[in-house]
Amino acid sequence: MRNSKFLVLICILTVTTLLGYSVTFIVEAPVYTPDDESIYLAGNFNNWNPKDEKYVLAKEYDHYSITVELSGNIEFKFTRGSWETVEKGQNGQEIANRTLYVDKDMTVQLEIMHWRDFVERRQVNLRNTYTGNIKLLKDFYSPQLENYRDVVIYLPPDYESSGERYGVMYMHDGQNVFDATTSFAGVEWGADETAQELINSGIIRPIIIVGIYNKGVDRLNEYSPWVDESYGGGDGDLYAQFVVETLKPYIDSNFRTLPDRENTAITGSSLGGLISLYMGVKYNDVFSKIGVMSAAFWFANGEIMNYVKNTNFEKQTKIYMDIGTAEGNDATVYLEGSRTMRKILLSKANVELSYVEEKGGTHSESAWARRLPQLLTYFFGKTSK
């Protein structure tokens, strides 16, 4: 009998190994990825076929995904159907094969930085695009999350000469904020150029902007306090604590800031918009201004809706919220979510809301860059408080 059980166990293990485990890849692709072209998964599991129809990714909202059966040591890359269109690195360089060890069901979140053909045709900008006085904090440590990230800081034109103190806006996805060479798909928000122009023209008060890099594969986890069964999440409270309890005190101690809530803003887009609103509500004694651009209110079955509905704004708060009418494959998901949140916010005391719907606006850095002047003017305009 003991031998029979042993044989059954061997059979079960063998079947599991042959069939593999369920691996879901959630992939962010460059914004310039052609809409009419597919993305493929190629690796040592399909003889490195760059256009295997069994491994084509599905486009969903603002990302791509595929679920496949794999096991053991995996090497792979993403292509658009040929090795001439294989993925490239952040600065357009060749990258090593991606690797993954599969010994259980898992979800993997990845980001494609560039495509070979676009880089070789020089259709993406790979040169540093900073404007003005930029400071970089390399490998800034978060004790709450036990990880490191870069933080990039824009200082206003007169910072070195004035001796003045300045209001601060904290922005998520910091690698997308100032520099096209580090930004998602080579397109930046241009927050440095926009702030510089608005300051020099006298439209807004001089401000400091702090861009907080996301952690790539951990971005979804850090930008939501709630868990989405399909995409992850759940570390949003730790991330919020990092910004409020570790990063902000450092910025206030090392730069000439106005640290009070009246001069402190938090801003982001997509899931960055969701975590901005969450942080602005939870830490209402820290942030008086909340920028919520194209927010992914659908994440985790819309838990953010219930949170905002059931939580009071204890102090007067300015909220800028916007949305495009052509965001994602199903634009109604983002659009209706924003319209619902607008109704909730309008019912709250102590909320001053500026709401913008951009006709034809997409879920992209270029769209957020286009609307950023409205946000900055609303928060820091010389006639605003």
Image (cartoon, helix red, strand yellow):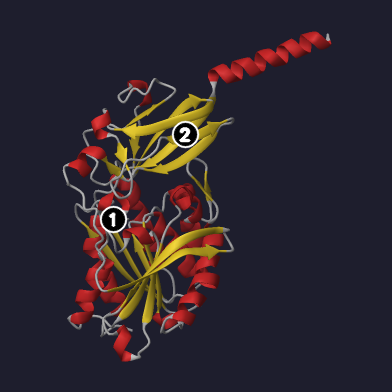
- Quadrant of the rendering where the C terminus is positioned: bottom left
| Dot 2 alpha-carbon crowd within 10 angstroms: few under 14, some 14 to 19, many 20 or more | some
Towards the viewer: 322 or 66: 66
Query: Who's the residue at 43% across and 62% down the image?
Result: 150
Residue 92 appears in the rendering? yes
Q: Earlier in the sequence, mark 1 or mark 2?
A: 2
CA–CA distance between discs 1 and 2? 28 Å
The disc labelled 2 sits on which kind of residue? Thr
According to the picture, the residue beneath numbered tag 1 turns out to be 181
Towards the viewer: 208 or 75: 75
The disc labelled 1 sits on which kind of residue? Thr
- Which SS class for mark 1? loop
Residue 139 image position (x, y, % from top left): 47, 62
Q: Is residue 136 left or right of residue 14?
A: left
In the rendered picture of this protein, how many numbered marks are placed on residues? 2
- Quadrant of the rendering where the N terminus is positioned: top right
According to the picture, the residue beneath numbered tag 2 turns out to be 24
| Dot 1 alpha-carbon crowd within 10 angstroms: few under 14, some 14 to 19, many 20 or more | many
- Which SS class for mark 2? strand
Q: Nearer the viewer, mark 1 or mark 2?
A: 1
**Looking at the image, residue 227 lies above or below residue 245:** above
Q: Is residue 332 left or right of residue 287?
A: left
Q: Is residue 54 left or right of residue 253?
A: left
Please tell me in which quadrant of the rendered image residue 195 appears.
bottom left
Q: Is residue 381 left or right of residue 308?
A: left
Residue 70 image position (x, y, % from top left): 50, 25
Residue 37 image position (x, y, % from top left): 23, 33
Towards the viewer: 190 or 280: 190
